[in-house]
């Protein structure tokens, strides 16, 4: 290396070190609220030096850091919607812990007090936080089971035989919800279908649900919203947690979390999750098992490094997931080894490896950088009767951005991203079925997408209003330039009311066979008309949140409305031909309108009540005719009740879900015995659970679907699964009856 280059390198290094030293004097801390069982970190709380404009907001773990340079009056002012403003005398401290008190609006408003295990976030976008305190009120064996008491997220079965599920926001299919794990897109493409069941509830610290258009940082695929699942680490977990669960079908689950601090800077958490298969059950007598036989093993390990003085945080995590599911006719005994056997069977074998890392470096209280990196490999082998489906997916993504203050009340995030996705799918159809099924073959999808983005946040009206605007440019190797603009507005004219509005576009490419895998199990042929183009949307939303209270009660009332317009949407056509499912680009309009109203009420600080109503209107055009989307309940009602005495020695919770009528695809051309009505009937689901707490031990027992409601004849032609009328796609309600369960948790605090 030439001498002048060495000198330049030395000068540059000295400049960076000097910059770090200049800002080395700082105050760090964490902001908490008092949760139901423990203190909960508050993300997006505002922390400022008194009588100055120098401030910051806490991260998702409640942490913050502020410089001490030029600060004479060392008092911090901390604010968060629904909590009393707090002023903290710092003095000579270099670290402070702040616990916010709920604001009773001069003793009347209580937004998130000791009993609130779910609450609305204080962010620009409409968000709802489901804490770990909420997750213990139901079985919550996995991510898919965490939303029985939530009105914003719908959990629906997409495959009767393997019990695969999807998570829906704004009434749209689960593929329009962007799923993140620790802010990273680990669940994407093929691994979403069964992946949401592979994350145990005991490993989840909290779930943040964002509705509608959101930040551009995470890409262009968030159409109906974002669900960010924050996994526990050393800072928010017990030293040891052991959980066991069993239901009346004798499906067993075991979970283990162990966290350990190796030094002041390094700590880690190790988690193990296992599911062992249940007994064979066929309560409705149709010859098909009511639930699949599941065997699952998941091993997860995360390491964290936090150099608080150097303002650097780094973590790295890895996960291995192995699973096998067997469903179908209860007389089947070959377990998928030979897909030409007579009894109908459906089996899935999964092997998956994932790894990810996050890095952040804070330069000043208003500037810093973050980087995210993740990669995964997913392999699946499946039998659907006489159809064999094998798939492999390799995924890699990276994202980094730099955030800095532009003006006094404005900050800018700008960065780059890259995504690589390769999917290989192979479909083999037994010669016996090739007369009706014509879609056998090899399907390869490869995406390489570099991108750049910028997002600005501007506060005005003395911080009562904030507008966030963002745009990203991505270059798709096949679809070329993708432009994604988004804007969000938050306005809080008083402590008791918050208005929000959002607008933005979305873009996604579909994975037909994984998203509609239940068709593989039916006798229908899959017909693809033309080249399927990407789906494109624009989403609008408005939201009003109002807090109220009195001497012995408090609560919130929330209303929101979101509309999604599709300029292209791939809609499966089940109606035109009963022996086919036709996929084609949209030839008219497609849209969804979703209205939701929710009342949350706390009485006597011991009783929590929720009452919510949701209206979902989804329509699309086909051949000049406007259709109502099938298998969608337009009207839904949710009500929940929770009680815990002051001693917290025990607790109880219950929830009721009511679903209105749904349009069903036409079966008029089927033989009479295989015909269904044009619409389903309304039904009600009731769940309840009781918890008993001891010093280190907790036991719980509950029931799901208390009224034992089951969809009649969920499988068409179940008596002859190889007939041309066999169909498993008519899922409009529960296919399993009442389920009783019990479990325990053993916990050792740090």
Image (spheres, grey):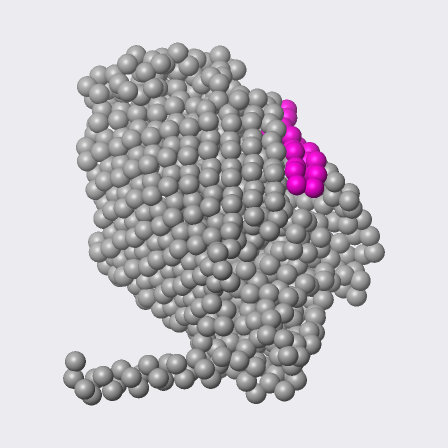
Can residue 254 be seen by looking at this rendering?
Answer: yes
Instruction: Assign the N terminus to one quadrant of the image.
Output: bottom left
Say which of 220 and 732 sits in front: 220
Q: Is residue 668 on the magenta stretch?
A: no
- In this rendering, is residue 566 above or below 735? below
231 relative position to 465: left or right: left
Taking the view exactly as shown, the residue that stands out farthest to the front is: 263
Q: Which quadrant would residue 104 be assigned to in this image? A: bottom right
> Is residue 278 left or right of 505 when viewed as pictured?
right
Residue drawn at (22%, 56%) of the image: 477
Q: Main secondary structure of the magenta part?
A: strand
Q: Position of residue 77 (x, y in %)?
A: 66, 74
Magenta range is: 685-707
Quadrant of the rendered image containing residue 95: bottom right
Residue 385, horizontal then vertical, whole percent: 31, 21
> In the drawing, does residue 392 fall left or right of residue 403?
left
Number of disc labels: 0
Judged left or right of residue 705, residue 318 is left
Where does the image place residue 691, in percent across and percent down from the top left? 68, 36
- Is residue 686 located in the magenta-colored stretch of the structure? yes
Q: Nearer the viewer, residue 598 or 5?
A: 5
- Which residue is situated farthest in the left direction here? 2
Q: Residue at x 23, y 30 (%)?
A: 427
Across and down, in percent, residue 648 comes to: 74, 43
């Amino acid at each position: 290396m030439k001498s002048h280059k060495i000198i330049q390198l030395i000068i540059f290094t000295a400049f960076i070190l000097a910059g770090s030293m200049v800002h080395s004097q700082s105050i760090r801390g964490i902001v908490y609220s008092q949760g139901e069982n423990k203190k909960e970190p508050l993300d997006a709380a505002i922390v400022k030096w008194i009588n100055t404009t120098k401030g910051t907001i806490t991260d998702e773990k409640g942490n913050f850091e502020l410089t001490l340079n030029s600060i004479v009056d060392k008092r911090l002012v901390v604010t968060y919607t629904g909590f009393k403003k707090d002023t903290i005398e710092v003095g000579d401290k270099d670290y402070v812990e702040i616990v916010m008190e709920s604001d009773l609006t001069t003793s009347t408003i209580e937004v998130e007090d000791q009993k609130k295990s779910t609450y609305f976030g204080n962010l620009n976008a409409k968000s709802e936080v489901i804490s770990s305190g909420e997750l213990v009120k139901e079985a919550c064996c996995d991510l898919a089971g965490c939303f029985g008491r939530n009105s914003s997220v719908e959990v629906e079965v997409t495959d009767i035989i393997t019990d695969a599920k999807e998570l829906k926001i704004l009434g749209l299919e689960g593929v329009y919800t962007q799923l993140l794990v620790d802010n990273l897109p680990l669940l994407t493409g093929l691994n979403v279908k069964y992946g949401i069941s592979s994350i145990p509830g005991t490993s989840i610290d909290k779930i943040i649900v964002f509705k509608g258009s959101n930040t551009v940082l995470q890409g262009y695929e968030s159409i109906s919203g974002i669900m960010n699942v924050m996994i526990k680490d050393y800072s928010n977990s017990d030293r040891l947690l052991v959980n066991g669960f069993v239901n009346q079908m004798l499906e067993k689950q075991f979970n283990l979390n162990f966290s350990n601090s190796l030094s002041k800077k390094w700590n880690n958490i190790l988690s193990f999750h296992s599911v062992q298969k249940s007994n064979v059950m066929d309560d409705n007598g149709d010859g098909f098992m009511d639930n699949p036989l599941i065997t699952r093993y998941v091993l997860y390990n995360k390491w964290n490094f936090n150099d608080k003085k150097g303002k650097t945080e780094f973590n790295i995590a890895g996960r291995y997931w192995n699973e096998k599911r067997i469903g179908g006719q209860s007389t089947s005994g070959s377990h998928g080894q030979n897909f030409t056997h007579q009894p109908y069977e459906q089996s899935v074998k999964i092997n998956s490896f994932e790894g990810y890392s996050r890095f952040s470096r804070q330069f000043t209280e208003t500037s810093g950088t973050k980087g995210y990196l993740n990669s995964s490999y997913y392999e699946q082998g499946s039998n659907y009767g006489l159809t064999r489906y094998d798939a492999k997916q390799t995924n890699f993504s990276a994202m980094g951005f730099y955030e800095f203050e532009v003006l006094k009340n404005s900050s800018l995030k700008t960065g780059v991203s890259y995504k690589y996705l390769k999917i290989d799918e192979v479909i083999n159809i037994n010669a016996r079925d090739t007369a009706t099924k014509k879609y056998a073959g090899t399907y390869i999808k490869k995406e390489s997408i570099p991108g750049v983005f910028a997002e600005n946040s501007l506060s005005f009206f003395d911080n009562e209003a904030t507008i966030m605007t963002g745009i990203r440019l991505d270059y798709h190797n096949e679809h070329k330039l993708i432009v994604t603009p988004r804007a969000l507005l938050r306005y809080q004219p008083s402590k008791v009311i918050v208005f929000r509005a959002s607008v933005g576009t979305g873009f996604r490419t579909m994975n037909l066979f994984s998203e509609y895998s239940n068709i593989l199990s039916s006798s229908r042929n899959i017909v693809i008309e033309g080249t399927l183009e990407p789906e494109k949307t624009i989403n609008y939303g408005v939201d009003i949140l109002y807090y109220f209270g009195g001497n012995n009660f408090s609560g919130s009332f929330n209303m929101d409305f979101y509309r999604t317009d599709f300029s292209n949407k791939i809609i499966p056509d089940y109606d035109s031909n009963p022996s086919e499912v036709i996929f084609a680009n949209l030839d008219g309009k497609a849209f969804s309108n979703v209205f939701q109203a929710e009342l949350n009420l706390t009485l006597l600080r011991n009783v929590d009540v929720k009452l919510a109503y949701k209206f979902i209107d989804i329509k699309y055009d086909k051949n000049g005719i406007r259709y109502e989307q099938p298998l969608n309940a337009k009207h839904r009602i949710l009500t929940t009740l929770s009680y815990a005495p002051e001693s917290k020695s025990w607790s109880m919770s219950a929830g009721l879900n009511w679903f209105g009528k749904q349009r069903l695809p036409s079966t008029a051309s089927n033989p009479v015995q295989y015909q269904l009505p044009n619409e389903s009937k309304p039904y009600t689901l009731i769940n309840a659970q009781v918890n008993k707490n001891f010093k280190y031990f907790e036991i719980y027992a509950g029931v799901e679907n208390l009224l034992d409601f089951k969809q009649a004849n969920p499988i068409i032609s179940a008596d002859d699964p190889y007939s041309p009328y066999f169909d498993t796609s008519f899922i409009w309600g529960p296919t399993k009856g009442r389920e009783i369960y019990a479990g325990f948790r053993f916990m050792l605090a740090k």
